Image: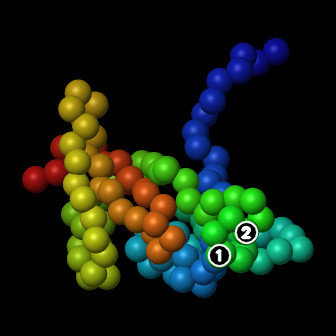
Amino acid sequence: MTAFGLKRLDHVNLRTGQLDVMTAFYEHILGMKPGPRPDFNFPGAWLYVGDHAVVHLVGQDATPGAHGHDLRIEHFALSAQGLDAFMARLRDEGATFRLARVPGFGIVQVNIEDPDGNHIHIDFPEDEAA
């Protein structure tokens, strides 16, 4: 029997009242690609990194408390490379961001928010930071 052990973050599922805007954000800002999604009986989109659906969006009523859920989560994090290219993309898109170094871990975080206000940090190796 194989011992239990987590391998990686599989996906994040986000509820949103603005499905098209959120899909465009993850596609244009983070470079994810919309891809195949099961034929669920509710609107949504799956955004891929390579062949892995990392972000699952569920379209729903944006009214506070609708469906008994708040739309936001605190944050999720993604590992990446190519800090300079990502920073250029953010500037080109006019996106707001905040840089933070993580002492002792060799990481630089680029903190952004999606159109629904979900906090995302993208982690880059510290040696990519100028």
Q: Position of residue 74 (x, y in %)?
A: 49, 50
Instruction: Give coordinates of residue 99: x percent, y percent.
Output: 22, 54
Quarter of the figure that contains the N terminus: top right
In this picture, is 52 found above or below 64?
A: above
Q: Quadrant of residue 107?
A: top left
Q: Are marks 1 and 2 in contact (CB under 8 Å)?
A: yes
Q: Which mark is residue 107?
A: none
Residue 123 vertical position relative to residue 38 in the rendered view, above or below: above
Dot 1 falls on a residue whose secondary structure is loop
The residue at which mark 1 appears reads as 62
Other residues around mark 2 within 10 Å, as few (<14) / some (14–19) / many (≥20): few
* Crowding near the residue tagged with mark 1, few <14, some 14–19, many ≥20 C-alpha atoms within 10 Å: some
Q: Residue furthest left?
A: 130
- The CA distance from mark 1 to mark 2 is 7 Å
Q: Residue at horizontal 64%, vertical 47%?
A: 10
Above or below, 92 against 100 in this view is: below
> Which residue of the protein is positioned furthest toward the front in this rendering?
65
Q: Position of residue 18 (x, y in %)?
A: 60, 80
Is 53 displayed left or right of 100 in the figure?
right
The reply to whether residue 33 is visible in this rendering is: yes
- What is the three-letter code of the residue carrying label 2? Ala
* Residue found 57% across the figure and 77% down from its top: 23
Under mark 1, the amino acid is Ala
Q: How is the image coloured?
A: rainbow
Where disc 2 sits, the SS reads: helix
Measuring 65% from the left and 24% from the top, which residue is drawn there?
A: 5
Taking the spot 86% from the left edge, 70% from the top edge, the residue there is 40
Determine which of the numbered discs, if any, sits on residue 66 in the image.
2
